[in-house]
Amino acid sequence: MTSPNNSKPLSQQAALVQKSLAKRYASERRFKAYGLASVLFGLCALLVLFVEIFGGGLSGFKTTQVALTLELDSDVLEVYDATNPDEILAGNYTGVIRNALKERFPDATGRKEKRALYSMISVGATYDLRDQLAADPDLLDTSIDVWILADDDIDTYYKSLSSVPYAERMSDKQQQWVQDLIDKQEIRTIFNTRFFTSGDSSEPEMAGIRGAIMGSLLTMMVTLLLSFPVGVAAAIYLEEYAPKNRLTDFVEVNINNLAAVPSIIFGLLGLAIFINLFEMPRSIPLVGGIVLTLMTLPTIIISSRAAVKAVPPSIREAALGIGASKMQMILHHVLPLAMPGMLTGAIIGMAQALGETAPLLMIGMVAFIMDVPGAITDPATVMPVQIFLWSDSPERAFVEKTSAAIMVLLMFLMFMNAMAVLLRKRLERRW
Amino acid sequence: MESSVLVIAIFVLGIIAFVVGRSRSVAISQNVGGIRFLNSLPFYYGALTALWCAIPSFLVFAVWSLFDDAIIRSAIIATLPAEAAESVGGNLNLLFNQIYNVSVDAAGSESAPDYMVAAAQHLHSMQSISRWALTGLVLACALGTSIVVWSRINPQLKARYQVERVFRSFLFLCSSLAILTTIGIVVSVLFESIRFFAMVSPIDFLFGLEWSPQMAIRADQEGSSGSFGAIPLFTGTLLIALIALIIAVPCGLMTAIFLSEYASSRIRDIIKPMLEVLAGIPTVVYGFFAALTVAPFIRDMGLSIGLDQWLPISSESALAAGLVMGVMIIPFVSSLSDDVINAVPQSLRDGALGLGSTRSEVIKQVVIPAALPGIVGGVLLAASRAIGETMIVVMAAGLAANLTLNPLDSVTTVTVQIVTLLVGDQEFDSPKTLAAFALGLMLFLVTLSLNYFALHIVKKYREQYD
């Protein structure tokens, strides 16, 4: 039963609440909209980034070629015996290509126009021609129709013709010649295999990422070999052995802090200790791998500890109960059960190390290196540093190469992350 | 023998020692009535022999390789005539490098003075003696220790206990590497910084308003004595970090709230991994994006609305770098906030909902106040990330040390200057190179204290609800 005295204020209160409800619901909707907007902002940023990189990068996997009829005249080439490697090496392939260009475009007169004409073909074309002749010596003194590599200015211009023509580095005459080639279908773009088979180069049309990929692989190998065993061992010590004392606390504080120290500081450490003090050579994957090991170690230790912690104590007690020693309990039971979690952490740490640039700049892996490294003591560069170097280059053609290299790097990273997720899904055990 | 071959040899010897030790323990066990009368399993006898074979010889190898260069070097330099040191002005490093080059490349040594050729031959013979002596010593050590252990194998030997002690010390060494790394960082930045502060006064460095680290190459050059006032770098760093945090903190926090409080679990399972992709993209990619797309866009926007009448607008702007850095940090902030929001007990939410609050009121008046310490910790960690971030600012923020708060102008940061000062050839005795280490020290101290503080807050907060 409600007393008449109370009912009036109650209904007044109800009215008050009722009145404010609209405002409160509006604020509720606003708040939710803010949340949605933030999520969308993040997703949009991701979308723009990918569209920008992939839109600009796809053309980087293609290269432009020009059709020419080459007269492999032995007098011009100065090669009389095509089976002799010395003669092949010294041949005048530039002359052959220039003659063919003069033949094809007779309207090029004067030194300036001729130079413009010659500059349409890449120096890489002479190497291709040399290899072709070395592979098939019978071609000497014959005339061959080949597609040869165009210069990066032609490449950029030809690719840009379908949208906004970029002709800043092209003379009118050169544009006419390209138009002529298009009309006669003597210019084409094909998949750029050189991008995956050669090292860095100052000529964009000849630059490739093989050297950087090899450098990254070697560096990652060193990092994995050092950081995984050490990280796992440290995690096991901290979880299974460490007594509760000041030293252990200090180690833990250190690990957590190191995980958040800026990566460039590890570069300073590498420069001062390994290069300056131990006088190790610069630019080698070994030093890079050691520096990245120190950087990723906290990540791997933290995730490995979580994996060890997730193994239920009953398993340890059961092992100890039937007479296993502590080491046997760890090596035979805890470690195998925690391995999937540790591997996942290691892959994530490796992915982080693969994308890292700043510390490697400090230890000199930023040098211009054309050769593909073959050992951990060869001078090398890595994928992210190659991207940095290309993005710094003034040539316009390097922009699409940079985007293409980024796409390759992102592919690697996504592959690694997908593997980590898969591993977690496949091997994860719930207790 | 080459050192890599030697390491492999040690490894192979270790495996052989394992097999021999194990088979001896099995053979011995036959005399006492079977394996179960041994103190430990045969595996442990093998392992003990292998460890004794590999570890001491490897230590000998490591110590020798660490010091042989220095010893040979001082021995060679001691034999040189006095005129040799004078010829290079007392620079013994240079002298030794010349001798080394002569010893490697005999053909190019025709023009070298006689004493140098002699020293080079001396060097060559000492190097080969050192190599052979090392090989002999390591192999003798490996064989000697394993034979001693092998001969001591008997049913009473506590092999397992000893192996486990080694195992435990190995684990301890690995975990103490974290301390060693920290010490390494502190030592490497601190020593070079002390040398820097011997040349440039700390007051000038910390409070100077002008940064132009170019030093005179020749003594008679004018006007480039170098000034090392780091205030423009600090303001530039803070400006960019502030822009990044203004983007990342509200956005990351609201994302975390939306995903954990509003979104259905299906949407969360789709969106969360997508946002995590943002965190996995290398910073060099963000830098490329900032320099190529965002910075020109911002400059064109600024020019098109006529801002350049009042403010200098640069193609490398603090805003572009800060904006992109903010996007990079969003997933970082959102995952940290997600953790702390989920740690708030459900009973608090249920209580507030039961009293008639709307969901946003629960979040604003109950969840966020309860999670505030954790969120603050997360923001501090994000700030430390933003301050230490390198590639985005190197590629998008520029090199000009302008003392300005205009986000459209070009500013430079501590990390950018470290990179510019240290990339390329360095001399470790010029203030220009050492300045980078002083900046590194500042960066390390600031991020360390931010991290320490943040982790402390987060830890305290976690304990509160555990």
Image (spheres, coloured by chain):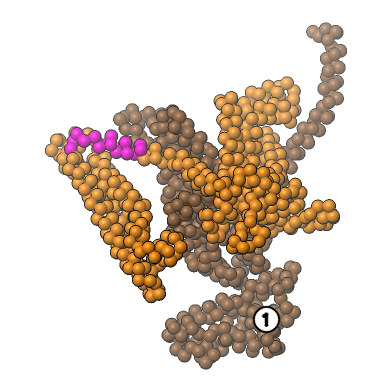
Instruction: Give me the residue at 34% from left, 55% from top.
Output: B71
- Per the image, the residue denoted by label 1 is A116
Asked if residue B173 shows in the view, the reply is: yes
Q: Position of residue B339 (x, y in %)?
A: 60, 34
Q: Position of residue B317 (x, y in %)?
A: 72, 53
Q: Is residue B183 left or right of residue A48?
A: left
**Chain A rendering hue:** brown
Instruction: Give me the residue at 52% from left, 37% from top.
Output: A256
In this rendered view, identify the residue nearer to me: A86 or B42.
Answer: A86
Q: Which chain does orange denote in the image?
A: B
Dominant SS of magenta comes to: helix
**Residue A66 appears in which quarter of the rendering?**
bottom right
Q: Magenta region: which residues?
A: B154-169
- Residue B115, relative to residue A34: is it above or below? below
Q: Secondary structure at mark 1?
A: helix
Q: Amino acid at mark 1?
A: Ala
User: Within 10 Å of the Cα at label 1, are there few (<14), some (14-19), or many (20+) other Cα atoms?
Assistant: some
Q: Chain of mark 1?
A: A
> Which corner quadrant holds the N terminus of chain B?
bottom left
